[in-house]
Amino acid sequence: MIKKVLQYVFLGLAVYGVIVYLVINFYKDDPQAMIWQDREAFNKRYISKLKPDMTVELDEVLETLGSPDLTYVKSEGEQVVQIVFYRTQLVKPDGITTQDECTGLLFENGKLTLWGAGAIVAYDKAFE
């Protein structure tokens, strides 16, 4: 009797372990379905993991973080400079997302080049 109960306990633990493994490795977070506090934390965590030597495409960021809160584009000939803003910190709880509540990611021809305060400065100086 005890042997049979232990078998069921171990089987249950094994099934639980497999389910946890599958959720952790294959469940993708959906920023659009998150409440705003979770989305801010998710955006901040993703952006903090970016490294200067990484090659990140605009499509990859859009797929991971969803649509940006603010976006601006400049183009001249074949050169396209785009800055997208994702909210990472709440400044004023008024229901309006402003640039000072966001972190900017600067893309040149679809490739991430800068993020943070430097991205805003570089975007402003683009094509001057």
Image: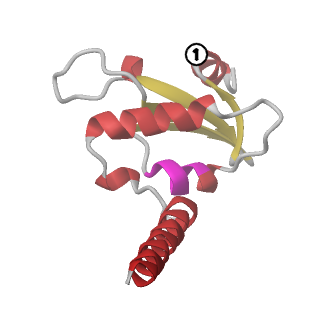
Q: Is residue 42 above or below residue 14?
A: above
Quadrant of the snapshot with the C terminus: top right
Residue positioned 16% across, 23% down in the render: 94
Q: Position of residue 110 (x, y in %)?
A: 68, 48
Classify residue 70 by image quadrant. Answer: top left
Question: Observer-nearest residue: 23 or 57?
Answer: 23
Q: Is residue 62 above or below residue 7?
A: above
Question: Observer-nearest residue: 76 or 43?
Answer: 43
Q: Total marks drawn?
A: 1
Tell whether 59 sits left or right of 71: right
Q: Position of residue 9 (x, y in %)?
A: 42, 73
Is residue 83 something that shows in the picture? no
SS at mark 1 in the image: helix
Residue numbers of the magenta segment: 61-66
Q: Which residue is mark 1?
A: 117
Residue positioned 18% across, 29% down in the render: 95
Is residue 15 something that shows in the picture? yes
Please say whether residue 27 is one of the residues in the magenta stretch: no
Crowd tier of the residue under label 1, counting other residues whose Cα lies within 10 Å: few below 14, some 14–19, many 20 or above = few
Classify residue 114 by image quadrant. Answer: top right
Quadrant of the snapshot with the N terminus: bottom left
Please say whether residue 65 is one of the residues in the magenta stretch: yes
Tell whether 83 sits left or right of 11: right
Residue positioned 43% across, 43% down in the render: 68
Residue positioned 43% across, 25% down in the render: 102
Q: Is residue 122 above or below residue 113?
A: above
Give the dominant element type of the magenta stretch: helix, strand or loop. helix
| Amino acid, disc 1 | Ala
Colour style of the rendered protein structure: secondary structure
Question: Observer-nearest residue: 82 or 44?
Answer: 44
